[in-house]
Image: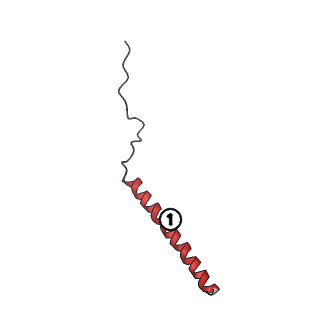
Amino acid sequence: MSKYLQKIWIQTALIADEIERTRQICARSLELLRLPVPNTFLGNRLGAPPEKEE
């Protein structure tokens, strides 16, 4: 195999690896986007209200 063809083959393999990594990142991003939006409003009461002392 000539050096030129060898360089092309190596670059093709590197591009294929990059494409696979990009697909994995996109799949993970899609999973995260499908999660419900977190409630980050600070004024919300998440637990039971505290009991009032008399």
- Foreground of the two, 30 or 41: 30
Residue pushed farthest right? 3
Q: Quadrant of residue 52?
A: top left
Q: Quadrant of residue 4?
A: bottom right
The residue to which callout 1 is attached is 21
Q: Mark 1 belongs to which amino acid?
A: Arg
Q: Residue at x 54, y 74 (%)?
A: 13
Q: Quadrant of the C terminus?
A: top left
Q: Position of residue 15 (x, y in %)?
A: 53, 73
Q: Which of 44 and 6 lies nearest the eye of the viewer?
A: 6
Instruction: Say left or right for 36 vs 11.
Output: left
> What crowding class fits label 1: few (fewer than 14 Cα within 10 Å), some (14-19), or many (20 or more)?
few
Q: Is residue 54 above or below residue 48?
A: above
Q: Where residue 21 appears, x then y in whole percent?
A: 50, 65
Q: Residue at x 36, y 19 (%)?
A: 51
* Coloration mode: secondary structure
Above or below residue 2? Residue 22 is: above
Q: Residue furthest front?
A: 1
Residue at 51 percent of width and 72 percent of height: 16
Q: Position of residue 19 (x, y in %)?
A: 49, 70
